[in-house]
Image: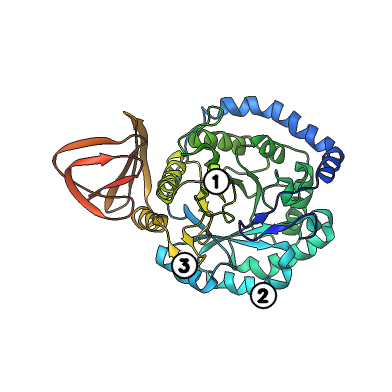
């Protein structure tokens, strides 16, 4: 990654691009694409806003739903043990195009998890955005070496942030098209995901899905963060997490460029008092207890939508936003146990129903041996039962009582057949 672009190793993302003259010049150069983003949104948005209320749910299970992002540069040997401890089968691994000299180390790391479902997230720099011949060369290497071991490649990331190297959707589409052509010329069995827009900025997603470029996605990837709004149930412009997913699903269904497959490849909440490792300001940060609650509820809501194929938490080890803090030693946060319990209890289950009543959220799932009803409320409530009710708390401790407290921390009511 070359100046004026630079990488922040604390928060695992590029630093803000401070060259305002460059940003202004590039946006002026890309004016045609910016107009295309506006026009496509004006045309498509009204249709999808109506369509989101008419689309039926799909039938999805939790088999590959609970995903996790892991990194080669974050305690790789410990990562291998932690992945097994959590029981993870669905992983996302980031690889930087500006670190192609490390491809063999990346490959060995990937091969260790070859029996799991892996998305390889190919992250761009400005050099590869501008030099498409260099991009083609390096993508060919990645497809040849990594293709046998991964299920999908996410081509590029965060197209709507200039610090990541893209100044327009058109630039991203040209970038993605290189991968798409390689697939059809040499690598017909690989799957490609895009366009990886971050946050609730769907006008960029619209343009990436409705255009005249000759390309298609094998799945729609999105970095659907909601951390700036606090809890996942909170709304932005009238859209909470479920409604944002509904709208994204309607775009996938309507677009000729993508199947109705949605992968949320990044989401998390930044954690208080972790600067400079937190990727945002302290204002958006939450304490570790809220972090664990929000994480579990995000997964539950996304699965309840029955429109998301997988959610990948970003990420396993990271001081500012991960399940594990590795600043002095590997310290498992409360969220680690919450994720472990959620995955072990809900793995390979089927959706039964979801509803909200009396300000409570109810999600019911089942498998061959049991049903699990997950309940939470944004305000603390009490429920009374005629006989003692058996349930586990968010972190896996079992309880049996006639009076059950329902609050922001989800509980699991388990009924064995």
Gap in angstroms between the C-alphas marked 3 and 2? 26 Å
Closer to viewer: mark 1 or mark 2: 1
Q: Residue furthest left?
A: 387
Q: In which quadrant is the N terminus drawn? A: bottom right
Closer to viewer: mark 3 or mark 1: 1
Q: Position of residue 93 (x, y in %)?
A: 59, 62
Residue 27 or residue 361, whichever sits in front: 27
Q: Position of residue 291 (x, y in %)?
A: 44, 48
Residue name at image x 70 percent, y 68 percent: 144
Q: Quick one: label 2, few (<14), some, or many (20+) residues within 10 Å?
A: few
Residue name at image x 80 percent, y 47 percent: 19
Identify the colour scheme used. Answer: rainbow
Q: Report which quarter residue 336 is drawn in.
A: bottom left
Q: Position of residue 362 (x, y in %)?
A: 34, 38
Residue 192 or residue 223, whichever sits in front: 223
Per the rendering, the mark at residue 166 is none
**Residue corresponding to mark 1:** 282
Horizontally, is 398 left or right of 264 in the view? left
Q: Report which quarter residue 100 is drawn in.
A: bottom right
**Residue corresponding to mark 3:** 330
Residue 395 or residue 104, whichever sits in front: 395
Gap in angstroms between the C-alphas marked 1 and 2? 38 Å
**Residue corresponding to mark 2:** 104
Q: Secondary structure at mark 1?
A: helix
């Amino acid at each position: 990654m070359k100046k004026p672009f630079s990488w922040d190793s604390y928060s695992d993302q590029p630093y803000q691009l401070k060259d305002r003259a460059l940003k202004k010049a590039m946006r002026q150069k890309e004016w045609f694409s910016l107009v295309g983003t506006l026009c496509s949104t004006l045309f498509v948005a009204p249709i999808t806003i109506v369509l989101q209320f008419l689309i039926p749910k799909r039938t999805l299970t939790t088999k590959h739903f609970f995903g996790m992002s892991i990194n080669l540069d974050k305690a790789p040997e410990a990562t291998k043990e932690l992945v097994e401890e959590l029981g993870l089968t669905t992983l996302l691994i980031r690889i930087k195009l500006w670190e192609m000299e490390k491809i063999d180390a990346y490959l060995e790391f990937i091969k260790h998890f070859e029996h799991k479902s892996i998305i390889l997230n190919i992250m761009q720099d400005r050099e590869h955005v501008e030099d498409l011949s260099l991009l083609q060369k390096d993508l060919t290497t990645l497809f040849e070496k990594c293709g046998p071991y991964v299920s999908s490649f996410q081509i590029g990331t965060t197209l709507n942030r200039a610090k990541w190297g893209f100044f327009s959707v058109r630039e991203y589409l040209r970038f993605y098209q290189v991968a798409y052509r390689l697939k059809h010329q040499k690598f017909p069995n690989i799957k490609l995901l895009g366009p990886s827009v971050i946050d609730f900025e769907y006008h960029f997603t619209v343009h990436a899905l409705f255009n005249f470029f000759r390309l298609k996605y094998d799945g729609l990837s999105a970095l659907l963060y909601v951390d700036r709004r606090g809890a996942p149930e909170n709304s932005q412009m009238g859209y909470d997490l479920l409604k944002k997913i509904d709208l994204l699903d309607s775009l996938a269904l309507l677009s000729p460029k993508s199947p109705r497959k949605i992968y949320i490849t990044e989401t998390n909440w930044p954690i208080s008092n972790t600067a400079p490792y937190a990727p945002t300001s302290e204002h958006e940060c939450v304490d570790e207890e809220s972090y664990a609650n929000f994480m579990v509820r995000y997964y539950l809501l996304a699965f309840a939508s029955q429109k998301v194929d997988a959610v990948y938490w970003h990420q396993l080890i990271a001081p500012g936003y991960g399940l594990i803090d590795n600043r002095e030693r590997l310290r498992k946060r409360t969220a680690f146990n919450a994720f472990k319990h959620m995955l072990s209890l809900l793995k390979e289950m089927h959706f039964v129903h979801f509803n909200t009543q009396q300000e409570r959220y109810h999600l019911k799932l089942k498998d061959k041996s049991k049903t699990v009803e997950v309940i939470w409320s944004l305000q603390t409530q009490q429920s009374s039962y005629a006989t003692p009710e058996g349930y586990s708390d968010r972190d896996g401790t079992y309880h049996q009582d006639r009076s059950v407290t329902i609050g922001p921390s989800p509980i699991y009511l388990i009924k064995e057949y």
